[in-house]
Image (tube, rainbow, N blue to C red):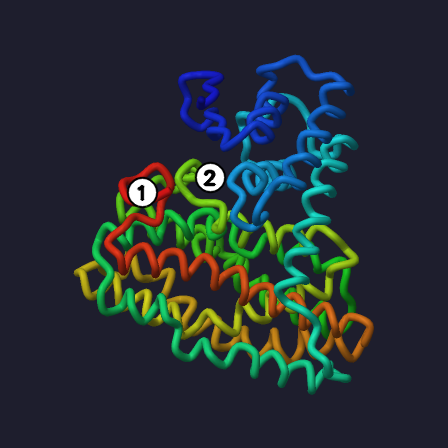
Amino acid sequence: MTTRLTDDPIRTAPNARGPVSDTLIGVLTGARQTTDANLVELAGSVASALQATDDLLFDEDLQLTLYLLYVLHYGPAEFVEGDWEWNPQLIGIRHLIERQLEEELRLHNPSPTTLPVNGEEVAETLFSMTADAAQPTLATWMARHATVDQLREFLIHRSIYTLREADPHTWAIPRLRGRAKAALVEIQSDEYGGGRPERIHAEIFAQTLRSFGLDDRPDAYLDVVPAVILSSVNTMNFFGLNRRLRGATIGHLAAFEMTSSIPNKYYSRAFARLGYGEDVTWYFDEHVEADAVHEQIAGRDLAGGAADDDPRLIADIVFGASACLFVDDLAGQLMHDRWTNGQSALRNSPGGE
């Protein structure tokens, strides 16, 4: 059941999706008395849930739990009572889930037999890995067939990450140096509007939501997005918040930028086809041009520069790119499969989960 601390909807905690997230939400909201013994018990529940899950990437309870643990580092999360961000027990619980998440991601994205050996080869490998983005299945289908209701669902799914767009990758800035650091700062500066608050990409997307009649507050739709959407966001947060995986963060961002420009062109067409104007399409139009530039910087200067500076990062750069493509494809495939079968891709909706 949703925990309401006041009548202000911003203070509303998300609905639990199982016993683990229910216990965590109780801790974070102060709805139950919390002791070290309670947190040890929570850790035991997480360990049991991890052992029992059929597929962590689709596990509603564990993905929501991990998402909420990451939200503590970002905010806003006004439903949280007290300062839990660096609580040692919660960090330990997060690590339990992250360890299995990494195992699963590496299982699905094994290292290639032959790795690139320098920055130039890394860049060419990434461009080759992302070449299929020239024909993005979901985006091209949406441009031709998506209904208003499906476009609404699409924006709801995108809101979970995009209202905090770029933030997970920004963690890598102090962990890099030289050419790679400069490239990452250049990309992120554009994402954050180049010093103009109204051009911050997250703010442009918030305008899109408002123009479409949707709530523009972060996590407003957390209750209705499925685990696979949370998996996509949790993956980039996992990479970004762990310094040892800075190579994976680089690879993830590179793949993210390399597969953004063309799909956004089709997303813009989908909205324009149904009569929506620039107040809705601006976000997508902005990314057609910006990400065409970013993909070159990300591939050659960020990933290539990091590889030349520290060749030990190469394997994780390739892994991060592969993981990005993998988890984002899972999310895109869910939407495509549901919508082409006349079903909702949201939880708690007719035809949804």
Q: Amino acid at mark 1?
A: Leu
Instruction: Look at 61% across and 27% down and name the residue there.
Output: 24
Q: Residues within 10 Å of mark 2 (few under 14, many from 20)?
A: many
Q: Position of residue 241 (x, y in %)?
A: 70, 50
Residue 219 is tagged as: 2
Amino acid under label 2?
A: Asp
Disc 1: which residue: 214
Q: Residue at x 43, y 53 (%)?
A: 198
Q: In the picture provided, is 323 more to the left or to the right than 242?
A: left
**Compared to 140, does 170 lie above or below?**
above
Q: Quadrant of residue 247?
A: bottom right
* Quarter that holds the C terminus: top left
CA separation in Å, label 1 and label 2: 12 Å
- For image coordinates 57% across by 46% down, the residue present is 54
Q: Nearer the viewer, residue 289 or 21?
A: 21
Q: Work out which quarter of the rendered image holds the N terminus and state it.
A: top left
Percent coordinates x, y for residue 30 in the rendering: 61, 17
Which residue lies at the image location 49% right of the left edge and 50% below the top edge? 228
Total numbered circles: 2
Helix, strand or loop for disc 1:
loop
Say if mark 1 contacts mark 2, CB within 8 Å.
no
